[in-house]
Amino acid sequence: MKEAKCERQIHEGKIPNEMGHSIVRAQTQKTGEFLSMVVNTVNDYLNQTTLESLQAELPIEKGYCCDVLSTLRRMAVFCEGGAEACRRLLMQEPFQEARAEKTLYNVYHQCIEEFFMPKKDTWCENSRASYTGVSAIEFYHAVPASLEQLLLPLSAAFLKMREELAHYEASGSSMAPIR
């Protein structure tokens, strides 16, 4: 009887489960590293790119360029917040598994899903990309090569992270369902 009660408490997160902690901790660390990479990559691009430089590369509508740059800034902010949350969780002892799972859930929705479906509809996801090996991102308008060179490699990394977080959720975690 005591074993069943202990098992239930472990499952509910009332008693630390070392195996669960190590899995959640590892995923939190990997997610934080991914988000930091995204922030660095996007910020490097934004620090070198202006509206005028985008339009000089390829004459496109000014409003669309503004929306693209705004979407990139928004993505950088969300990813930076997620990376900081992961970093803080990893510094805490004891490791707070429930908070980490909630953070991973939020990262999935605020960063990963936002990348594939930006609020301003500057691009969309090619849902068959993972099956066909083509880019996961489709732009609504022609875009400069520098933007494609930024987003197309990032899309592969975002696809991989989305799969990892979905797999993590499906592997028996107590995290709220992602889909």
Image (cartoon, rainbow, N blue to C red):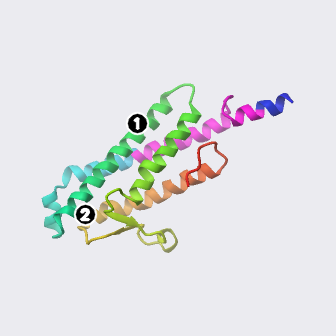
Q: Position of residue 165 (x, y in %)?
A: 54, 51
* Quadrant into which the N terminus falls: top right
Does the magenta portion include 28? yes
Q: Which of disc 2 and disc 1 is earlier in sequence?
A: 1
Tag nearer the camera, 1 or 2: 1
Q: Which residue is mark 1?
A: 84
- Spot the residue most to the top: 93
Q: Quadrant of residue 22?
A: top right
Asked if the residues shown at circle 1 and circle 2 are in contact, with their CB atoms under 8 angstroms apart, the answer is: no
- The residue tagged with tag 2: helix, strand or loop? helix
Q: Is residue 72 left or right of residue 157?
A: left
Q: Which residue is mark 2?
A: 146
Q: Amino acid at mark 2?
A: Ser
**Closer to the camera in the image, 153 or 118:** 118
Question: Tag 1: Cα neighbours inside 10 Å, few (<14), some, or many (≥20)?
Answer: some
Q: Position of residue 16 (x, y in %)?
A: 66, 30
- The residue tagged with tag 1: helix, strand or loop? helix
Q: Amino acid at mark 1?
A: Glu
The dominant secondary structure in magenta is helix
For image coordinates 34% across by 61% down, the residue present is 151
Q: Is residue 81 left or right of residue 5?
A: left
- Spot the residue most to the right: 1
Magenta stretch in the rendered image:
7-35
